[in-house]
């Protein structure tokens, strides 16, 4: 967002020639670092988009007349893979999953969900463009690329346009920019399509544009121009996949006694504060389209069958029959449509995700680690998130074994590798993705001592590995089980947790307390503060333990026993 912050006059972010505002985080991303531990990081929460007023009386249900193509849905309707692997052949199961991850998603794209678009895929570049975006960006979490990749947003876009190397992170404008670069755009002079009040005119100068007044003029009389069914046929035919939709706050505005003027802009004004989305597909029969961005994926008209609606990750939306009149509680107004010329004509020859991953296998009953692969370069192997997700579908013996792909940023000279998301398989064989924001990166529920340890486990490669039995006296119940630091306390090899302690063990204890209905102010943040100490004292008193507010061997065992109930 443009404005005054931390002593920076962001009015200089306006290019005099193109008058295109750059997002402040993008402009200064060379200096941007992931926030330090304890620094508040706000994941923006959007209000539901508002439909146009003249459509409100007709709005009854967003149920799809024809299910939209969605990798996150289709992945869990394809058949389970066949295998003859024994449950104790852990190395064989790992090899099986590694092999499946490298197979791609051809079975998903040939499923009936996509069959309605087969002819389009063969005869037009538009469907090939849409499939490439979905294959390579599905699962990307809603967070700033500047936290994970050095060089700034312009360098990120240049890496896609010149080399096909794309980031595994993005907010609305970065995600749409990545999609446009996948379609052949070079990222422009800013490396960013933008989301402020000047973004729609900027995009329109690169091809075609339609303001809200244009849409009204080419719709049935007295309509808002926001219901697709009201558009004249020629307008509907002009709109193609890759067309962008823009919303923004107004400018000038007054905030905290300051008003925007020609030399400086108030934080939150339209010079950078807004939203952008992209048309991914047009319905083959109805006046509806499918959108692509980080807002419509979780304020979608209908819930996804296989992905939690609030996950704030990228996936193909449901069908939309209208353009939201406003966003962000009415503060952002729809500004118009625009499309860059030449999309899909000279797209990158190959695409490579800038991340790394490793496979874990754990036993569900006690979370004991059975297998851990080395870190694998997703870029050098060409492994998109969607391929890893598909490999989790119907994983062998998933009722007893829990496979997980841990996906991190790659790390470089400027940025350390950081958690981005996980792909897992539940006990019923469903493939799932998870992203829980914590200081800008993923708060992985698996203890760091397991997923971030160096090298493979077990060290010797090849051959069957029989799962070891649970250790006598080990913690049995989630969320305590499987945490090596807590197991060490239980075994008498480590000191008790106390006020001031930090880490995954503290987070697990906080989760356990909340599961047992003991209040923990601030939730499971991994910090042992006075609120946790008070909750532990209450638990100790209720269970006849010595009351010292520390989590030692006796308190841990009592917590684990209480979770049995």
Image (cartoon, rainbow, N blue to C red):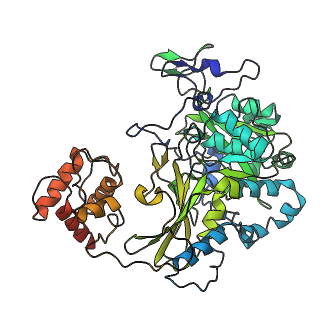
Of residues 52 and 9, the one drawn nearer to the viewer in this rendering = 9
Question: Is the residue 247 above or below the residue 10 in the image?
Answer: below
Of residues 537 and 378, the one drawn nearer to the viewer in this rendering = 378
**Side (left or right) of 370 relative to 546:** right
Residue that lies at the very extreme toward the right in this rendered image: 123
The residue that appears at 21% across and 67% down in the rendered structure is: 557
Splitting the image into 4 quarters, where does residue 10 fall?
top right
The residue that appears at 57% across and 72% down in the rendered structure is: 94
Splitting the image into 4 quarters, where does residue 491 fall?
bottom left
Query: Which quarter of the rendering shows the N terminus?
Result: top right
**Side (left or right) of 438 relative to 281:** left
Of residues 443 and 515, the one drawn nearer to the viewer in this rendering = 443
Residue that lies at the very extreme toward the front in this rendered image: 460
Count of number-bearing discs: 0
Tell me, yes or no, if residue 282 can be seen here.
no
Tell me, yes or no, if residue 502 can be seen here.
yes
**Residue 175 coordinates in the image, percent (x, y):** 65, 45
**Residue 434 coordinates in the image, percent (x, y):** 51, 58
The residue that appears at 35% across and 62% down in the rendered structure is: 483
Of residues 496 and 148, the one drawn nearer to the viewer in this rendering = 496
Query: Which quarter of the rendering shows the C terminus?
Result: bottom left
**Residue 358 coordinates in the image, percent (x, y):** 55, 61
**Residue 304 coordinates in the image, percent (x, y):** 58, 62
Question: Is the residue 222 above or below the residue 562 in the image?
Answer: above
Splitting the image into 4 quarters, where does residue 262 fall?
top right
């Amino acid at each position: 967002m443009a404005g005054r912050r931390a002593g920076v006059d962001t009015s200089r972010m306006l290019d005099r020639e193109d008058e295109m505002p750059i997002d402040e985080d993008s402009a200064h991303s060379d200096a941007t670092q992931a926030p330090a531990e304890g620094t508040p990081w706000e994941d923006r929460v959007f209000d539901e988009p508002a439909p146009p007023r003249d459509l409100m009386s007709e709005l009854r249900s967003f149920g799809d007349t024809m299910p939209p193509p969605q990798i996150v849905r289709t992945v869990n309707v394809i058949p389970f893979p066949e295998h003859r692997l024994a449950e104790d052949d852990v190395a064989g199961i790992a090899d099986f999953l590694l092999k499946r991850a490298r197979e791609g998603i051809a079975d998903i794209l040939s499923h009936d969900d996509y069959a309605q678009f087969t002819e389009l895929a063969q005869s037009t570049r538009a469907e090939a463009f849409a499939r490439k975006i979905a294959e390579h960006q599905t699962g990307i979490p809603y967070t700033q690329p500047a936290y994970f990749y050095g060089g700034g947003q312009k360098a990120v876009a240049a890496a896609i346009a010149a080399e096909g190397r794309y980031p595994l992170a993005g907010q609305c404008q970065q995600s749409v920019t990545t999609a446009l670069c996948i379609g052949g755009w070079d990222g422009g002079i800013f490396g960013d399509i933008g989301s402020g009040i000047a973004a729609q005119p900027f995009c329109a100068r690169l091809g075609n544009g339609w303001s809200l007044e244009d849409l009204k003029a080419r719709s049935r009389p007295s309509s808002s121009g926001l219901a697709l069914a009201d558009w004249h046929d020629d307008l509907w035919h002009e709109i193609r996949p890759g067309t962008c939709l823009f919303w923004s706050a107004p400018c000038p505005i007054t905030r905290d006694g300051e008003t925007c003027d020609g030399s400086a802009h108030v934080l939150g004004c339209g010079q950078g504060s807004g939203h952008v989305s992209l048309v991914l597909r047009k319905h083959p029969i109805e006046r509806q389209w499918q959108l692509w961005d980080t807002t419509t994926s979780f304020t979608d008209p209908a819930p996804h069958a296989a992905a939690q609606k609030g996950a704030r990750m990228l996936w193909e939306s449901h069908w939309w029959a209208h353009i939201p009149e406003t966003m962000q509680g009415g503060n952002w107004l729809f500004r118009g449509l625009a499309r860059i010329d030449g999309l899909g004509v000279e797209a990158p020859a190959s695409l490579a995700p800038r991340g790394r991953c490793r496979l874990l296998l754990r036993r569900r009953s006690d979370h004991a680690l059975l297998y851990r692969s080395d870190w694998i370069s997703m870029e050098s192997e060409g492994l998109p998130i969607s391929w890893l997700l598909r490999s989790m579908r119907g994983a062998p013996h998933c009722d007893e074994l829990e496979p997980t792909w841990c996906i991190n940023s790659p790390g470089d000279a400027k940025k350390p590798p950081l958690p981005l998301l996980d792909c897992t398989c539940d006990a019923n064989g469903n493939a799932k993705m998870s992203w829980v924001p914590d200081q800008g990166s993923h708060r992985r529920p698996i203890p760091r001592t397991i997923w971030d340890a160096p090298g493979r486990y077990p060290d010797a490669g090849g051959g069957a590995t029989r799962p070891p039995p649970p250790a006598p006296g080990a913690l049995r119940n989630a969320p305590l089980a499987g945490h090596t630091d807590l197991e060490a306390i239980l075994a008498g090899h480590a000191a008790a947790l106390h006020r001031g302690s930090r880490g995954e063990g503290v987070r697990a204890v906080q989760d356990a307390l909340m599961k047992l209905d003991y209040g923990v102010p601030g939730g499971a943040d991994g910090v042992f503060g006075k609120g946790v100490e008070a909750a532990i004292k209450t638990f100790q008193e209720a269970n006849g333990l010595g009351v010292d507010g520390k989590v030692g061997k006796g308190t841990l065992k009592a917590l684990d026993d209480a979770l049995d109930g």
